[in-house]
């Protein structure tokens, strides 16, 4: 796998996360892996009141949010016909 690209290689992505910070987020880290390769960047602060940027190699605990992500992926896989939407009889 190639190493992540620097911020200047995807200025539109860096601008998007900077706009998120401008709108009120304390800090944002974004990792994208698409047909152009992998890109990672951050903007804002790692902690409220601090100046250090969020680390691009940090770990984020998302807790119960995983249920929403999992359900979305399952629905996408059903729509693509990759898994069945079977049901149990009653």
Image (spheres, rainbow, N blue to C red):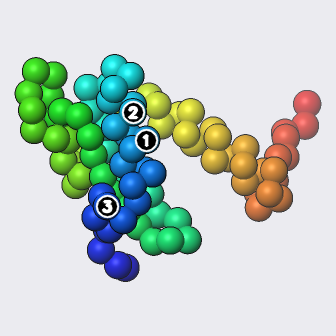
Which element type, helix, strand or loop, lies under badge 2? helix
Q: Which mark is residue 16?
A: 1
Instruction: State which quarter of the image contains the N terminus.
Output: bottom left
Question: Badge 1: how crowded within 10 Å, few (<14), some, or many (20+)?
Answer: some
If you read the primary sequence from the N terminus, does the residue marked by circle 1 or circle 3 appear first? Answer: 3
Q: CA distance from mark 2 to mark 3?
A: 16 Å
Task: Name the residue that disc number 2 marks.
Answer: 19
Circle 3 sits on which residue?
8
Which SS class for mark 3? helix
Quadrant housing residue 23: top left
Residue nearest the viewer, comparing 9 with 3: 9
- Left or right: residue 84 versus residue 71 is right
Res. 72 mark = none
Q: Classify residue 55 as left or right of residue 31.
A: left
Q: Badges 1 and 3: C-beta atoms under 8 Å apart?
A: no
Position above or below: 87 against 34: above
Q: CA distance from mark 2 to mark 1?
A: 5 Å
In the displayed structure, would residue 61 be above or below residue 64? Answer: below
Element marked by disc 1? helix
Q: Position of residue 76 (x, y in %)?
A: 72, 49
Q: Residue at 77% across / 61% down in the picture? A: 82
All told, the count of numbered labels is 3
Q: CA distance from mark 1 to mark 3?
A: 13 Å
Label 2 close to label 1 by CB (< 8 Å): yes
Left/right of residue 71 with respect to residue 78 in the rendered view: left
Mark 2 vs 3, N-terminal side: 3
């Amino acid at each position: 796998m190639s190493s992540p690209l620097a911020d200047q290689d995807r200025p539109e992505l860096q601008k998007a996360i900077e706009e998120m910070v401008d709108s009120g987020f304390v800090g944002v880290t974004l990792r994208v892996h698409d047909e152009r390769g992998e890109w990672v960047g951050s903007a804002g602060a790692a902690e409220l009141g601090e100046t250090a940027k969020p680390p691009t190699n940090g770990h984020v605990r998302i807790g119960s949010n995983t249920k929403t992500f999992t359900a979305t992926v399952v629905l996408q896989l059903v729509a693509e016909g990759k898994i069945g939407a079977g049901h149990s009889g009653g």
